[in-house]
Image (cartoon, rainbow, N blue to C red):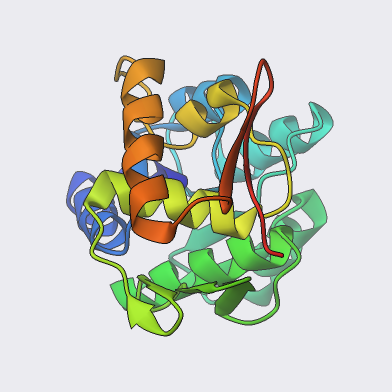
Amino acid sequence: MRALIVEDDPLLADQLSQAMTQAGFVTDIAADGTQGEYLGATESYDVAVLDLGLPGLPGIEVLTRWRDQGIGMPVLILTARGDWTDKVAGFRAGADDYAVKPFRLDEVVLRAQTLIRRAAGHARPQIAAGRLQLDGQLGVITLDGMALKLTAFEGRIMTYLITHRDRIISRTELSEHLYEAETDRDFKSIEVVIGRLRKKVGDGIIETRRGEGYVLRSA
């Protein structure tokens, strides 16, 4: 999963990035509203963590512009104030959830994970896909009840495929949700890793649709 963190406090942004990376996210950081608005409009993210008090462009304006452009990624807003009017303004602009500073890092991670699951139509942290099951909170993927030994990159691919099971995922879409903004996106590496995953989960679970992409079958 890929997250955009728009936060002007470098220490907090780094702490959020580390916490989300440990939970299996790939993260990009924007230090002001202008950069954040641009990244959110030009890159593909599963969730955005957006501070309201930003230099350059206020967080509410960033969110409003995203929604006006039809960008529907879940957005968790951060505010240093507990004033309800800030939360109301955020929700009116299109926010999906909020956290008031100071907050626990693991709380933000859990809220972000929940927003992603809800956006994909999953209400619970455990997502079943046939013989596979993803525990989104623990970051564990099991096959017939046994935990799979996966590299971090393999885990990110499997998490995305399970979350979007039974849907064709193009190589472009998959790469957009696996790599950071400044990283070269290597389709060949994805194909190699998909081959390794097939050996770990068995034939027939991950299908390749020639010219279209991949499908993880849940039945």
Any part of residue 28 in sight: no
Q: Which residue is drawn at 75% across and 61% down?
A: 91
Q: Which residue is drawn at 31% across and 14% down?
A: 184
Number of numbered discs overlaid on the protein picture: 0
Residue 98's place in the image compared with 165, above or below, is below
Q: Nearer the viewer, residue 124 or 80?
A: 124
User: Which corner quadrant holds the C terminus?
Assistant: bottom right
Residue 29's place in the image compared with 87, above or below, is above
Residue 56 is situated, as x and y percent measured from the top left of the image, at 47, 26
Any part of residue 145 in sight: yes
Q: Along the horizontal axis of the image, is 11 left or right of 55? A: left
**Residue 7 found in image quarter:** top left
Q: Residue at x 41, y 38 (%)?
A: 194
Q: Nearer the viewer, residue 80 or 119?
A: 119
Q: Along the horizontal axis of the image, is 192 left or right of 96? A: left
Q: Residue at x 73, y 45 (%)?
A: 167
Q: Nearer the viewer, residue 215 or 116?
A: 215
**Residue 130 found in image quarter:** bottom right
Q: Which of 170 and 8 is in front in this view?
A: 170
Residue 20 is situated, as x and y percent measured from the top left of the image, at 32, 58
